[in-house]
C-alpha cells in the first residue's frame, strides 16, 4: 500500500484523461491534490469535488502554463492551500490530430505545439522545483513518439523527445534531493485520442500493440504513483514505457 498521507501533489492537465486519473489516484493514496486546467474549469472543479469526497484537500488553478505569471499565480495559490509541494506531475499538453508532413507544417501549429508541450513544461518545472521538499518527486509525461518519432506529427514528437531529454537533465541537476522520472505512454483511451480510435482505427491500432489492448488512463496513473512513492526512491532519470510493448515494434 502506497501511503502519501500528509503530502501534497500538483498535477498539471488534471481536468481529464491521464491527469484526472492521476489526481484521483494520489488522493486515494492519501495526498492532498491540486490540479491545473487551461480552459476546462467545470471539469477541473468536478475533479476537485471528487478529491474532497475522498477526504482530501483539493485545489484547481487555470490558465496557460506557458505564461510565467499564470504559473506564478498557480504556485502561490497552491502553496497557500497546502503549505508544501512534495510531488509534481506534468501532464498538460496537446496532440494535434491532423497528420501533416513537415513541408506543409505551418509556423502557427509548430509554435502552438511547442508552447503547450514544451514551453509550459519548462515554466512549470522552473517555478515548482524551488518549492519542492527534499525527498520529493517529479514525473513528466512523454510518449512513445518521443522515443521513436511519429511521421506526420513531427511537432508533437519533437516536444515529447524534448521532455525525455529534460527528464535526464533535471535528474542530474536535482539529485540527491529530488527524483525526476518520465513515463512514456503509447495509445491511451482518452478524449484526446477518441477520434483516432473510432471505427476501424481501434482495431488497426490494437494490432500494433503486443499486449493487444489500448491503455486506460488508470494504466498510466499507476506507474506515475509508483515513481513518486518510496518504492521508487532509488530510481531517477528513467523513462518508463507504459505502452503495452508497442515501442518495441518500431
Image (cartoon, rainbow, N blue to C red):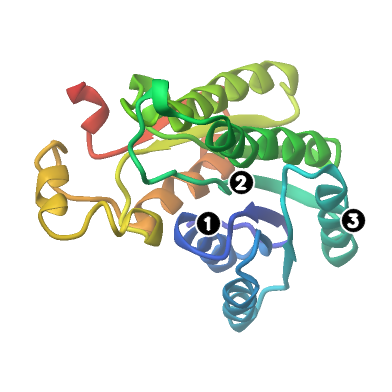
Q: Determine contact: label 3, label 1, CB under 8 Å.
A: no
Mark 2–mark 3 distance (CA, rounded to whole Å) = 17 Å
> Looking at the image, is 177 positioned above or below residue 217?
above
Residue 174 screen position, x and y as percent = 74, 23
Residue 14 screen position, x and y as percent = 58, 60
Q: Would you name the residue on which mark 2 appears?
A: 89
Query: Is 127 on the left or on the right of 189, as rendered?
Result: right
* Numbered badge on residue 19: 1
Residue at the spot x=90%, y=63% of the render?
80
In front here: 55 or 219? 219
Sooner in the amino-acid sequence: mark 3 or mark 1: 1
Residue 249 screen position, x and y as percent = 17, 24
Q: Would you name the residue on which mark 3 appears?
A: 76
> Looking at the image, is 232 positioned above or below residue 164?
below
Residue at the spot x=9%, y=41% of the render?
207
* Numbered badge on residue 151: none
Residue at the spot x=16%, y=38% of the render?
209
Sooner in the amino-acid sequence: mark 2 or mark 3: 3
Q: Secondary structure at mark 1?
A: helix
Is disc 2 surrounded by few (<14), some (14 to 19) or many (20+) residues within 10 Å?
many
Q: Determine contact: label 2, label 1, CB under 8 Å.
A: yes
Amino acid at each position: 500500500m502506497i501511503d502519501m498521507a500528509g503530502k501534497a501533489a500538483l498535477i498539471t492537465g488534471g481536468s481529464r484523461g491521464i491527469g484526472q486519473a492521476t489526481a484521483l489516484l494520489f488522493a486515494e493514496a492519501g495526498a492532498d491534490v491540486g490540479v491545473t486546467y487551461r480552459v476546462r474549469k467545470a471539469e477541473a472543479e468536478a475533479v476537485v469535488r471528487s478529491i474532497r469526497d475522498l477526504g482530501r484537500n483539493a485545489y484547481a488553478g487555470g490558465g496557460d502554463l506557458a505564461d510565467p505569471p499564470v504559473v506564478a499565480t498557480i504556485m502561490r495559490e497552491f502553496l497557500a492551500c497546502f503549505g508544501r509541494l512534495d510531488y509534481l506531475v506534468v501532464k498538460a499538453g496537446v496532440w494535434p490530430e491532423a497528420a501533416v508532413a513537415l513541408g506543409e507544417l505551418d509556423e502557427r501549429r509548430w509554435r502552438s505545439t511547442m508552447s503547450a508541450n514544451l514551453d509550459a513544461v519548462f515554466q512549470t518545472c522552473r517555478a515548482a522545483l524551488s518549492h519542492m521538499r527534499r525527498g520529493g518527486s517529479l514525473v513528466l509525461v512523454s510518449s512513445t513518439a518521443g522515443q521513436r518519432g511519429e511521421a506526420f506529427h513531427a511537432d508533437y514528437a519533437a516536444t515529447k523527445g524534448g521532455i525525455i531529454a529534460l527528464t535526464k537533465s533535471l535528474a542530474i541537476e536535482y539529485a540527491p534531493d529530488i527524483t525526476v522520472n518520465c513515463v512514456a505512454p503509447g495509445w491511451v483511451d482518452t478524449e484526446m485520442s477518441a477520434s483516432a480510435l473510432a471505427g476501424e482505427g481501434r482495431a488497426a491500432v490494437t494490432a500494433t500493440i503486443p499486449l493487444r489492448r489500448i491503455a486506460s488512463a488508470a494504466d498510466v496513473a499507476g506507474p506515475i504513483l509508483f515513481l513518486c512513492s518510496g518504492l521508487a526512491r532509488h530510481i531517477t532519470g528513467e523513462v518508463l514505457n507504459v505502452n503495452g510493448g508497442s515501442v518495441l515494434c518500431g
